Image (cartoon, rainbow, N blue to C red):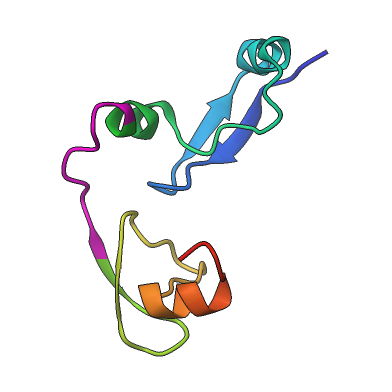
């Protein structure tokens, strides 16, 4: 019924597998949303966060410096905090 799915971690930007077994567990527990973080980032978040490695990139909107918690990938836009907040009200 369930098949493994590849998801992208919202913290580190890396791909991770949401296994069929995990999907079944989520369904049994009544969880409606898929996980947004890989296991490493979930564990780090549960342990109090620690110090997250930050990367610098050029904001694709304003050209300023963007400090981001994931390694930027070629072809994917990166935004500074201010531009991200303007583009995503309630999330920035």
Q: Residue at x 56, y 32 (%)?
A: 35
Q: Magenta span covers which residues?
A: 46-55
Residue toward you, 65 or 85: 85
Asked if residue 16 lies left or right of residue 48, the reply is right
Q: Is residue 82 above or below residue 48?
A: below
Q: Residue at x 24, y 37 (%)?
A: 49
**Quarter of the figure that contains the N terminus:** top right
- Residue 24 relative to residue 18: left or right: right
Which residue reaches farthest left?
51
Can residue 80 be seen here? no
Which quadrant is home to the C terminus? Answer: bottom left
The location of residue 7, given as percent across then percent down, is: 58, 38
On the rendered structure, is 12 left or right of 75?
left
Residue 48 colored magenta?
yes
Q: Quadrant of residue 2?
A: top right
Is residue 20 at least partly visible in the picture?
yes
């Amino acid at each position: 019924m369930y098949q493994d799915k590849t998801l992208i971690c919202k913290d580190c930007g890396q791909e991770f597998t949401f296994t069929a077994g995990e999907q079944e567990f989520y369904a049994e527990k009544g969880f409606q949303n898929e996980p947004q973080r890989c296991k490493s980032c979930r564990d780090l978040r549960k342990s109090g966060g620690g110090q997250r490695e930050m990367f610098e990139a050029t904001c694709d909107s304003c050209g300023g410096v963007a400090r981001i918690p994931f390694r930027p990938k070629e072809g994917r836009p990166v935004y500074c905090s201010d531009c991200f907040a303007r583009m995503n009200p309630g999330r920035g």
